[in-house]
Amino acid sequence: MFKTLSEAMEVSNRYIVSKRHIDGPPKETDFELKSEVISLSLEPGSNSVIVKNLYVSIDPYQLNRLKSQSSSQAFSILAAPINPGEGIDAYGIGKVMVSGNPEFEKDDVVIGLICWGEYSVIKPGGMLRKLDPMGFPLSNHVGVLGFSGLTAYGGFFELCKPKKGEKVFVSAASGSVGSLVGQFAKLFGCYVVGSAGTQQKVSMLKEKLGFDDAFNYKEESDLKATLKRYFPDGIDIYFDNVGAEMQEAAISNMKVFGRIAVCGVISEYTDQGRKAAPDMIDVIYRRLKIQGFLAADFMDLYPDFISTTTQYLRSGKMHSLEDISTGVQTIPSSLVALFRGQNIGKKIVQLAQQ
């Protein structure tokens, strides 16, 4: 029995949606795996592109999009709110199956905003471009050569304006951004200490990534005293990925004219009552610069970032840490793992083979 053309051009698309707004720590039961049949053909005149998803990035900020309300939702189109039952998009890599857009052809490898599912239909105006892998694994382009890498590079070099020999502290240093900030700082010639949540991560920071020192924050009862121990003369640069008590402790240990890049406040994402309360007299009299930022602020640095980072990777001076799960059904548990500190490096879900 032969299939008709229309039957042969249909595929089952499994995808993830949230069942409810998520205002606390995410749980796997907050999500649902759904399935729909989609056609691998386009209407005549359509400019859409149908993509088979290969890799999707899992990032803490995505939780803020799933909340009933978050101030982040108003200030970035990439952080726009997502209601229960709606498709969830994320940065990822795919392969073009069908294209009505003259910029893309079948089998092109593309990168941009795709959905938490096995296929994505990208309409005109969607964020999508062709990807040149440059000889690197595709997964690298979601992490070290993607927004995580640009966040680390731009936040450290553009905001913090490091000088050789300066003392740098990185929180969540084994995460997708922190692990890269520490490496950029070391390669630039800074003294670097990182914090992480397990002894395994602490050892990895020192032995594999070359941090000068690292500590397990869960084993420390007084973070201010801990940082005083590691930085007896003070901190020049703090790259903040966690907020809350760690931010307070870092500010109390900063040098005069210290710089703080506020990249993320993951400890506050799941507990709305938990906020950093730094001593503002410290901020004033130490003349501290504290600035929040988004990766999109540094798009003009993208060529420099790619040139520098690919050179470091090829020479073996820099390591890409990736934590890859397989299958669309693992997306919810992958997001949950981020907030439980179970990942090392960039959390990615592989959805299909190329």
Image: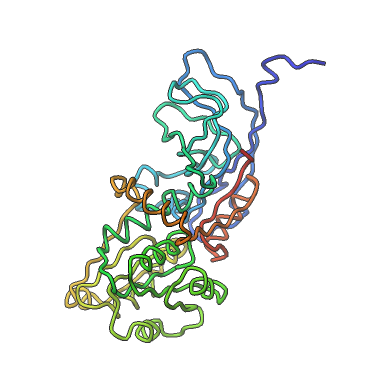
Q: Of residues 229 and 43, which is closer to you in this image? A: 229
> The C terminus lies in which quarter of the figure?
top right
* 262 versus 90 height, above or below: below
Q: Quadrant of the N terminus?
A: top right
Q: Residue at x 64, y 43 (%)?
A: 33
157 versus 236 height, above or below: above
Q: Please give the name of the residue rendered at 51% of the width and 54% of the height, measured from the top-left corner.
A: 22
Residue with the most extreme front position: 315
Total label count? 0
Q: Nearer the viewer, residue 82 or 144?
A: 144
x, y percentage for residue 274?
41, 69
* Residue ID at (54%, 19%): 42
Q: Residue furthest right?
A: 1
Q: Can the viewer see residue 83?
A: no
Rendering coords of residue 214 (x, y %): 45, 77
Q: How is the image coloured?
A: rainbow
Residue 300 appears anywhere in the view: yes
Return the x and y of residue 105 as percentages of the image width and height. 51, 24
Residue at 37% x, 65% y is 187
* Residue 177 coordinates in the image, percent (x, y): 43, 60
Left or right side of 188 for 66: right
Quarter of the image holding residue 15? top right
